[in-house]
Structure formats: C-alpha cells, structure tokens
Image: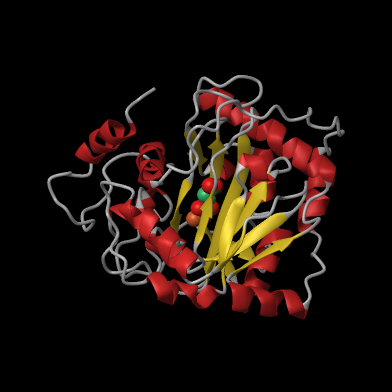
Amino acid sequence: MIDKQQQSNNLLVGANASESGINQSWQQDNQAWWDWYVTLADNTDQQGHGELLQLPPIPNIGMSSDRDIKDELTKPYDLKEDHCLAFRRDGSIKLPKVLSLGAVARLRHELVQLLKKRFNVSNDGRNDNRFLSLEMMWLENPIIRNYVLSPRIAKISADLLGVKSVRLYHDNVLAKEPGCGRTPWHCDDHHFPLATDAVVTAWIPAQSIPTAMGPLAFAKPLSIFELVKDIEFNKFDTSYDKQVTEAFKSNNVLVDDGPFAIGEVSFHHNRSFHTAASNKTTRTRIVLANTFFADGARVIDEPTMVSGDWQKFIPGVGPGEIAASELNPVCWPANIEGNV
Ligand SMILES: O=C(O)CCC(=O)C(=O)O
Ligand SMILES: [Fe+2]
C-alpha cells in the first residue's frame, strides 16, 4: 500500500509544494488532483474495518435502448415547489426516480467501459482502492452525452437554483473503489472557479449505494457553511477535514448520509458541505456528477490550485471573463444551441 502522506507530498511537487498557500495553479491532471485530494481525508475512524462487504449481485435489469434513453432524459421531472424550497433551505436534495432502472443499468455499463479503457480495471470497474476520475466524457461517448446534456436533469438544476438558464461546467465520473477511504468534508465553491452562487451538481449513482458503500452525505442546512468558514484549508494534511468534523459534531449538525436507491439522484449547491464515507464493499461506487451554473456567470479573478484543471472545462476563457466556451453548452432551456 502506498504511504498516503508520501503520495500526497509527491503529488504536490507538481503544484509547487514549497509554497504553503493554495494560490498557485494546479499543474497536473484531474486524476492527480483526486489522488491528492483524498489524502486530505481523516480515515482514523474507518480503519480496522477488515473484510469488505460482499454485496448481492446487481439485479439483472435489461438496459434501456439508445432511443429510450434519449426520450427519458428529455422528459421533464415532476419537480414540486416544495423540492425547490427544501433545496434552497438545505443546500441539497435527493430525488427518487430521476432515472429508470434500465437507464441506470446502461449508465453503469458505459461508465465501466470508459474506466476500463483509461485504467486497468476489472469487469466490475475495480482496480486498487483508488478514487478514479474521468471527466468530459460527453465529448467522447454519445450515450454519456445524453446523460450529461439531459434537459430533464438540467431543468431540475435550473429550477432548484431558481434561474432561467444553466450551462455545463463539467461532467465527472467518480469511481470509488473497494477499500478507498473517505472523501474529505468540503463545499464545491472551493473547487469551482465560478463567480456565482448559482452552481449545482447532479450526482447520479450508476447503481444503488448502500450505507457501506459510502453515499454522498450532506450537512444541513445550507447556511451551515458559516459555521466552518474560518477554518483554514491545509493542503498537506487532514487537519481541515478533522476540524470540520469536530465543528459539526460539537454543534449537532444534521448530516444526511442515507443510502441511494437505484434511479435516485442528489443535487447539491456549491456552498453545501458534503463528504462520503469509505467504500467498505467489494463493488466500485460509480457515479456521474454533472455540474451546472447560471448562464452569464464569470470565472473568478484568482483561481487557486483547489480549482484543479479548470481550464480544461472552460478553455480560452480567462479569469474575470464570462464562462461560456464551446464546452459550456446551455443545457436548459434545451436545444437553443443545438446541443441535444
Ligand atoms: O463522490 C464523492 O465522494 C465526492 C463527490 C463530490 O464531492 C461532488 O460531486 O461534489
Ligand atoms: Fe464536492
């Protein structure tokens, strides 16, 4: 097993480890970013868990056809005003049946193929207790394109944010392998170099996520970010994660860490604090996370290393400029740029 601290320090060489701050840019790719980022999670409570839990086989559900997927991902979801109010209060919401069983089965199938192509993973998407990441898959795979540019998902995102129109920031395939540790506490506002508070991520599991697999978990309400806003981020160790955990515990902050059923999708705001437990099962937790932002938003003036490889997602757009490159199509309202 690689020494996590050594790994973290090696990764930081590319980001100029001699500086103690975070105000330099990230020099490596997005996978290196995740390899570094998960080293910032405190796993002391998760160690000694021993055997991984063997889950029952994924139910043999027929995969939806290309045509059915396109239809399903275009149809509006029955989003209620109460959902929007809950999202604005809590900063996150989990919605059932955003996808059908067949669409989830197809999503997992496609994502496993993509992971196989990039990494040395088995048929179950499994490699070596890493957090694997792929991004911008909508440019490579026409099936995944339907899930990323989906008017159904983008309209939910726009309605939850209460904006007329949203653009894509990026898609991110997140594969947490068996035995991979926690995702550190954070809010995405630290990561996305967007000068707006109208950003939402649709986190779309490609299988059910029982508690033992480490579902995404959200602190509530949204305003809880105020409680931890003065904790200083430390790029070298787990101190930030530990301090946020402590602050939430001592203030009895509510954390929704429940499982995800097949087809359930969560939506979280860029200031929502979230984490995920380690994957204590023998199955890789595969998710497609699509991030959308209000049309018209600008890139912040000073992106940092925590912003990662952001120029890959907004090419040709500099700090302070409007984030509207050809890789940031308007996904809702649909079709205005002929993207679906
Ligand atoms: O999948 C995870 O564990 C973390 C994902 C995350 O932080 C996000 O999608 O914003
Ligand atoms: Fe996040």
Q: Position of residue 220 (x, y in %)?
A: 57, 70
Question: Could you tell me how many numbered marks the image carries?
Answer: 0
- Left or right placement of residue 23 versus residue 149 in this view: left
If the image is split into quadrants, where does the N terminus sit?
top left
- Report whether residue 163 is seen: no
Q: Position of residue 296 (x, y in %)?
A: 47, 74
Q: Residue at x 81, y 55 (%)?
A: 97
Q: Residue at x 68, y 80 (%)?
A: 85
Please tell me which residue lies in front, 176 or 173. 176
**Residue 304 picture quarter:** bottom left
Please tell me which residue lies in front, 243 or 125. 243
**Residue 83 picture quarter:** bottom right
Above or below, 147 relative to 86: above
- Left or right placement of residue 294 versus residue 309 in this view: right
- Report whether residue 208 is seen: yes
Q: How was this image coloured? A: secondary structure
Q: Position of residue 67 (x, y in %)?
A: 83, 43
- Left or right placement of residue 21 versus residue 295 in this view: left
Q: Position of residue 293 (x, y in %)?
A: 52, 67
If the image is split into quadrants, where does the C terminus sit?
bottom right
- Left or right placement of residue 132 versus residue 6 in this view: right
Above or below, 139 relative to 130: below
Q: Residue at x 70, y 43 (%)?
A: 210
